[in-house]
C-alpha cells in the first residue's frame, strides 16, 4: 500500500511536534509522505527568532521566551531531538540555562514602589523535565498545597513576632501585650490543634494510596473533610491576629507580603473544596475570571489583585483587547497552570535557551526532520482551505482542496533556511541560526532585488498587497494529499476558511471564534554598554521581572543571549520587554492589515517606549539615569547604537529592535472566562481527513504556552497514526497532563483508572509514594529557605 500523503499547513511548534511524532517510529516512510508548507523563510511561529549579521549577529525576537520547568512534553521532544543529532543523551542540557528566581515590583497605593522588590526563590531539584514520569494524582498535589499553607501560616506567625520586636512605638505596654499574645499563639494551646491536624493530613496522604479498599470518591470525601477542619482552624486564628496586628502588617513590607501569600493559599484551598475541583477537575471553574473566582471565595481585593496574581495574567498576556486595565483569564486555566508550574517543575523553575529559541529549539528540530526525510516548502502562503462544492454531491466532512501561493522562485529545488554559527558547538552539533531576512542568494535575482527595494516582509499576510505570488496552485484530496494537519494559528485561520461553512460539520467552529479572542502584543530590545548591576539593579541576578509601571510592566534581562561579536564591541547587557499592545484602528484589522499598518505600529511602539524610558527608570536602573538633566529618564549614552554614533538622546532608541506583533499569524491567543468550553480537540475537527493543532485547541492545557502547542501536536499525531496504522503513536497516556484538565466525566474516569493502576503495581506505588514524600519535603525546605 502506498504511503498516505500528509500536508502540514504551518511552521510553528505544534506543526513540528506533530511531524516529529509521526516520524518517530522505524520505517515511518512506509506509512506517510509528509510535506510542510510555511509562509516566509523561518520556522517557529509566535516564538520564532533570528540573528542579524548586519548588526553584530544580534538576536531579534518577538519577546521574552523562557521555558517553564513543567514542560514535560516539550522537553521530551527536545531531548530526543538532541540525542538523535549528537548521539549524546545529555547534549540538550548544554543548550539551556537553569533559573529559579521570579522578581516582582509591587506598587504602593500611596505612590511609588515598595522596597525592596518582591523576590521569590524556588529550590532546584535533581529531576529533569521530559523524562516521561507521570504526574501524581490531583488530590496528592492538593495535600501538598495544604501543607505549604500550613508552613506559610507558621512562617507568618514567626515573622509577626519578629516584626513586633522591631516596632518603635510610644505605647510599650501595648506592644508587650501583643508580644505575649503572639508567643501564646505560636507556642501555646491556640496552635496545637493546627499542628495536630496537619500531621494527621500528611499521614492520611500515604495511607489512602495504600488502602486498596477505598474508592477515589471516598478518598476525596475524607480529604475534603480533613482539610476543611484544618483551614477553618487556621482562618479562625488568623482573623484574630489580623485585628491585633493590622497596622503593623501594613507598615512591614515583609510581613504584609507573607500575609498576602498566606491569604492567597487559604483562598485557593477554600475554593478548591467549595467547587469540588478534586472531583470535577479544573474546567468547570472557567466560567469565572481568576480574580473573580478568588474574590468569590473570600479573598480581599489587595490579595485577589495583588502583583502575584496579576503576574499570571501578564505571563499569559491575558488582557482583553491588549488593555492592561482589563484582565480576563479563565480561573481553571490560571489555577491549573500555576499548580503545574510551581508543583511539578523539574530541575529548575525556568529553563532559558542559551542561544535563543531559534537556535536552541527550531534549528535542531528542522535538521532532524529534514534528515528523516520530511519535505519543507518555505515561501508558501495558504490562500484557502476548502470543503467540497455543494453542487458536487460529495460528502461535506472532508477537506477537498487547498489553494496555495508560492511567494518566490528559488534557484534550487529546496530552500536552505539556516546558517552555521561560528561560536556555538554542542557535542559535535554545529548550532545554526535563522537570519532576520531571506537568504537572497537562494532566490531569483530579479525577484530578490524587487523584494528588497519594496521592503516586503514575506512572513506577513499583508505582503500580498504589494507582492503577488509568483504561482498559485491547488492541492486536491486523493491526488495531492490524503490527510491535512492544520497548524495555522487561530488569528490567521479566518483568513483562509469560512467559519459558517465549517460549522456545518462541527458547530463549534463558529462559537470558537466568538469565545476565543487573540490580542496584539509588542516587544523591544535594548543593548547596553554597562552591565545590569552597573546600571543599578542588584536585587536579583539577570532578573525576570513583572509588575512594573505600565505600559511596560515586564522586563527580562537576557544578557546570556549576547554573542562574542557583541561582547567584543562593548555590549555588556541586553534587556527585553514584552507586553500586550493596546488594540486600535491601525493594528486591529486582522486579515485586512496593510504593510503601512506594520510601519505605523512600530512607530507607535517606539513613541511609547521612548516616553516610558524617559520617565520611569530609577526603580530599575538607578545608576543609569540622565542626572541632573532628567533624573527620572534613561541615560541614553549607555545604549549601544550598532554604528549609529551620531544619534543623541532618545534618537538612540531608533537603532534598537522593535517587534509589533500584529500580524494575524502571530497574534496571541488568550483564555478568557468561558473560552475553553468552545475549543476543539485536535482529533475532532469534524473533517475525517483533517487533524488540527495549536495552542488554541483543546489540548489539555488550554493556554497559549509552547507546552500546550506541543501537547496539541502530539494529540494530532496520535489520532492520525491511529487512523492510518491502527496504532496510536504516541499513546494517549504517554502525553503528560492531558486529562488533568479534561471534561468532568473524563477527569473522574481517568483519575479512578490511574489510582487503580498505581495501587495494583507495587513498583508504581513505591515511585508515587516517594514522589509525594519528595514534594512534601520540598515544600518544607522551600518555606525555610524563603
Image (tube, rainbow, N blue to C red):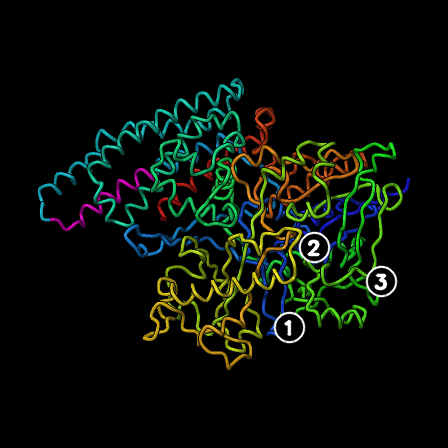
Q: Earlier in the sequence, mark 1 or mark 2?
A: 1
Mark 2 and mark 3: Cα distance apart in space: 21 Å
> Which residue was labeled with disc 2?
365
Q: Compared to 357, does 518 lie above or below?
A: above
Task: State which quadrant residue 600 falls in.
Answer: bottom right
Looking at the picture, tell me which residue is in the foreground, 60 or 521.
Answer: 521
Tell me the element at label 1: helix
> Which residue was labeled with disc 1?
53
Tell me the element at label 2: helix
Task: Single out the mark in the foreground, 1 or 2.
Answer: 1
Image spot of residue 313 (x, y percent): 47, 46
- The residue segment tinted magenta is 152-169
Q: Is residue 715 left or right of residue 579?
A: right
Residue farthest to the right? 1
Image spot of residue 561 (x, y percent): 55, 65
> Which residue was labeled with disc 3?
413
Mark 2 touching mark 3, by CB under 8 A?
Answer: no
Amino acid at each position: 500500500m502506498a504511503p498516505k500523503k500528509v500536508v502540514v499547513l504551518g511552521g510553528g511548534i505544534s506543526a513540528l511536534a506533530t511531524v516529529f511524532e509521526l516520524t518517530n517510529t522505524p520505517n515511518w516512510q512506509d506509512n506517510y509522505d509528509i510535506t510542510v508548507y510555511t509562509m516566509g523563510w523561518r520556522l517557529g511561529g509566535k516564538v520564532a527568532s533570528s540573528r542579524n549579521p548586519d548588526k553584530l549577529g544580534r538576536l531579534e525576537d518577538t519577546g521574552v521566551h523562557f521555558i517553564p520547568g513543567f514542560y514535560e512534553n516539550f522537553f521530551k521532544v527536545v531531548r530526543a531531538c538532541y540525542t538523535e543529532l549528537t548521539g549524546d543523551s545529555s547534549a540538550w542540557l548544554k543548550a539551556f540555562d537553569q533559573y529559579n528566581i521570579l522578581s516582582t515590583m509591587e506598587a504602593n497605593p500611596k505612590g511609588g514602589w515598595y522596597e525592596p522588590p518582591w523576590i521569590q526563590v524556588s529550590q532546584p531539584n535533581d529531576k529533569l523535565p521530559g523524562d516521561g514520569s507521570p504526574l501524581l494524582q490531583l488530590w496528592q498535589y492538593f495535600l501538598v498545597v495544604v501543607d505549604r499553607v500550613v508552613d506559610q501560616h507558621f512562617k507568618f506567625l514567626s515573622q509577626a513576632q519578629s516584626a513586633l520586636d522591631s516596632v518603635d512605638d510610644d505605647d510599650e505596654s501595648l506592644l508587650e501585650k501583643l508580644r505575649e499574645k503572639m508567643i501564646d499563639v505560636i507556642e501555646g494551646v491556640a496552635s496545637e490543634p493546627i499542628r495536630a491536624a496537619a500531621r494527621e493530613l500528611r499521614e492520611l496522604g500515604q495511607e489512602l494510596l495504600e488502602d486498596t479498599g477505598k474508592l477515589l470518591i471516598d478518598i476525596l470525601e475524607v480529604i475534603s473533610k480533613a482539610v476543611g477542619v484544618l483551614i477553618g482552624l487556621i482562618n479562625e486564628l488568623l482573623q484574630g491576629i489580623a485585628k491585633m496586628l493590622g497596622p503593623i502588617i501594613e507598615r512591614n513590607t515583609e510581613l504584609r507580603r507573607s500575609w498576602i501569600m498566606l491569604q492567597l493559599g487559604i483562598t485557593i484551598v477554600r475554593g478548591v473544596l467549595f467547587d469540588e475541583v478534586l472531583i470535577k477537575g479544573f474546567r468547570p471553574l472557567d466560567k469565572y475570571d481568576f480574580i473573580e473566582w478568588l474574590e468569590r471565595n473570600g479573598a480581599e481585593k489587595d490579595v485577589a489583585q495583588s502583583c502575584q496574581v496579576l503576574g499570571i495574567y501578564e505571563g499569559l498576556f491575558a488582557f482583553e483587547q491588549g488593555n492592561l486595565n482589563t484582565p480576563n483569564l479563565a480561573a481553571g486555566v490560571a489555577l491549573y497552570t500555576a499548580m503545574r508550574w510551581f508543583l511539578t517543575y523539574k530541575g529548575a523553575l525556568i529553563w532559558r535557551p542559551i542561544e535563543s529559541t531559534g537556535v536552541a529549539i527550531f534549528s535542531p528540530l528542522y535538521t532532524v526532520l529534514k534528515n528523516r526525510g520530511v519535505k519543507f516548502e518555505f515561501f508558501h502562503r495558504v490562500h484557502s482551505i476548502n470543503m467540497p462544492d455543494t453542487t458536487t454531491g460529495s460528502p461535506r466532512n472532508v477537506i477537498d482542496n487547498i489553494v496555495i501561493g508560492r511567494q518566490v522562485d528559488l534557484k534550487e529545488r529546496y530552500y536552505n533556511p539556516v546558517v552555521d554559527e561560528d561560536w556555538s558547538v554542542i557535542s559535535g552539533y554545529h548550532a545554526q541560526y535563522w537570519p532576520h531576512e531571506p537568504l537572497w542568494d537562494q532566490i531569483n535575482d530579479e525577484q530578490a532585488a524587487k523584494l528588497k527595494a519594496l521592503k516586503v516582509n514575506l512572513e506577513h499576510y499583508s505582503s500580498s498587497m504589494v507582492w503577488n505570488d509568483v504561482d498559485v496552485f491547488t492541492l486536491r484530496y486523493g491526488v495531492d494529499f490524503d490527510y491535512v494537519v492544520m497548524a495555522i494559528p487561530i488569528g490567521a485561520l479566518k483568513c483562509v476558511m469560512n467559519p459558517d461553512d465549517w460549522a456545518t460539520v462541527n458547530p463549534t467552529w463558529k462559537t470558537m471564534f466568538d469565545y476565543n479572542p487573540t490580542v496584539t502584543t509588542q516587544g523591544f530590545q535594548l543593548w547596553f554598554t554597562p552591565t545590569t548591576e552597573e546600571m543599578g539593579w542588584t536585587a536579583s541576578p539577570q532578573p525576570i521581572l513583572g509588575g512594573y509601571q505600565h505600559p511596560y510592566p515586564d522586563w527580562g534581562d537576557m544578557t546570556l543571549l549576547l554573542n562574542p561579536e557583541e561582547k567584543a564591541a562593548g555590549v555588556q547587557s541586553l534587556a527585553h520587554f514584552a507586553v500586550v499592545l493596546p488594540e486600535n484602528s491601525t493594528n486591529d484589522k486582522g486579515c485586512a492589515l496593510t504593510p503601512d499598518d506594520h510601519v505605523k505600529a512600530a512607530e507607535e511602539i517606539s513613541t511609547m517606549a521612548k516616553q516610558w524610558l524617559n520617565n520611569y527608570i530609577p526603580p530599575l536602573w538607578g545608576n543609569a539615569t540622565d542626572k541632573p538633566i532628567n533624573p527620572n529618564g534613561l541615560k541614553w549614552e549607555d545604549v549601544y547604537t550598532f554604528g549609529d554614533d551620531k544619534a543623541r538622546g532618545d534618537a538612540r532608541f531608533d537603532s534598537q529592535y522593535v517587534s509589533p506583533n500584529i500580524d494575524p499569524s502571530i497574534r496571541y491567543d488568550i483564555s478568557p472566562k468561558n473560552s475553553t468550553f468552545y475549543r476543539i480537540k485536535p482529533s475532532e475537527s469534524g473533517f475525517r481527513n483533517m487533524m488540527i493543532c495549536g495552542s488554541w485547541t483543546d489540548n489539555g492545557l488550554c493556554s497559549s504556552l509552547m507546552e500546550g502547542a506541543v501537547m496539541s501536536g502530539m494529540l494530532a499525531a496520535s489520532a492520525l497514526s491511529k487512523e492510518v496504522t491502527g496504532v496510536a503513536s504516541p499513546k494517549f497516556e504517554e502525553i503528560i497532563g492531558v486529562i488533568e484538565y479534561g471534561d468532568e466525566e473524563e477527569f473522574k474516569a481517568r483519575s479512578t483508572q490511574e489510582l487503580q493502576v498505581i495501587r495494583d503495581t507495587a513498583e508504581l506505588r513505591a515511585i508515587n509514594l516517594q514522589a509525594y514524600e519528595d514534594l512534601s519535603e520540598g515544600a518544607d525546605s522551600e518555606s525555610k529557605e524563603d
